[in-house]
Amino acid sequence: MALMAKRFDSSMKFISLSFRGLAVFLVYFSPLSNAPANLVSVQNLGTTYVDNTTSGGPWVLLGYGANGDLGSLLKATNGTFDSARQGSATLDALAYARSSAKLAISWNQTGKPNGGITSYTHAVAFSFTDPSLLTLTAAATPSDGSGSTNWSKISTDPSTVLLNVETLHGNPNLPSSMYARRETFGARYGGYYGFANSTTGNNQLDWGPDSQAFTTLFLGTNADGFYAGGAGGTQNGYVPSTMAIWAKMPTSSNAGNQANVTYTFTNAGATGREGPTQSQINTNYSGTNLASSVTINTQGIQEWTVPTTGSYRIEAFGAQGGNGNPSDSNTVGGMGSAMKGTFFLNSAF
């Protein structure tokens, strides 16, 4: 028996399983394995990094920027996602963000990490009650001001929302609840993504960095981002060296309801050294989760495209070899064997 993997664009997309004699392969899909952030093709988004290790994920990178400047709205592809992650880049992520249950922002005060969320110094996660309403225009709608019709702490406009802010990593030192614009995600008078709160008597939420006691976290779309934690204000804040925004992979992409699904490959009833034919595969896999998805181009080699980007544990079990001359102890077949390993596989879809 043999297990072979072919590579395309530096990531595994399908596996070929070669059966010689009796063998069984078990492939387990697990979206939350200990794989690092990988540059892969993500359905309905494009080529980006997927973080499978940080809690609450998998997390998909939508954009990042030196000094917190994304260089573009998250409604357009801009720049190139380089492995060093030194500059700025965004994907056209509006549709993806609308289908995601959570977003996350990670940042550093110094240095530019290029791994998953936990490779950054700090990170927070948050969710909109109805992400399908997002426009991600970063516009100042509702308008800035301190009244009930503005983006303010006393706003009665339904587009002013209070988000629960969850610490994913580090010590962000931000309030557990912060205000955001429900559709545009705009902050700082527009042109920025983020949220804010304050302990001042000023109910206004738009804030250009100064000494007032505002706590904020925002990324610029064409300017530097900013973080102000603790008691707030510039005295407790800084321009990060880098910031990134992530989305929880939607269940339509990570098949979250299929966690720990098992795909069982067999010899499909074939014996001898040639392995199964396509007809045998079709018959034996009928009614299973491999039905109509395994192809035989060379007899004995089963080709299967992984349906979902994620981490897979592959276990292979081979039978004992057949005996030769019964009267010759030197022709006894070799013992069977078992192998297993975990691989990050990229769906071709």
Image (cartoon, rainbow, N blue to C red):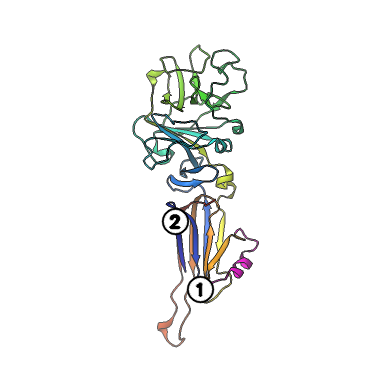
Q: Nearer the viewer, residue 231 or 219?
A: 219
Q: Magenta residues, as a range? A: 275-289
- Residue 229 image label: none
Residue at point 43% right, 34% down? 64
Q: CA gap, disc 2 to disc 1?
A: 26 Å
Q: In this figure, which residue is indicated by the disc labeled 1?
A: 21
**Residue 29, position as x, y percentages in the image:** 53, 53
Question: Earlier along the polypeptide chain: callout 2 or callout 1?
Answer: 2
The image quarter in which residue 113 lies: top left
Q: Amino acid at mark 2?
A: Arg
Residue toward you, 21 or 253: 253
Q: Where residue 184 appears, x then y in whole percent?
A: 55, 26
Q: Is residue 160 above or below residue 2?
A: above
Q: Nearer the viewer, mark 2 or mark 1?
A: 2
Q: Secondary structure at mark 1?
A: loop
Q: Per the image, is 160 magenta?
A: no
Where 145 falls versus 251 (above or below)? above
Seen as rendered, the residue at the extreme right is: 287
Where residue 57 appears, x then y in whole percent?
51, 41
Q: Which mark is residue 7?
A: 2
Name above or below for residue 226 compared with residue 14: above
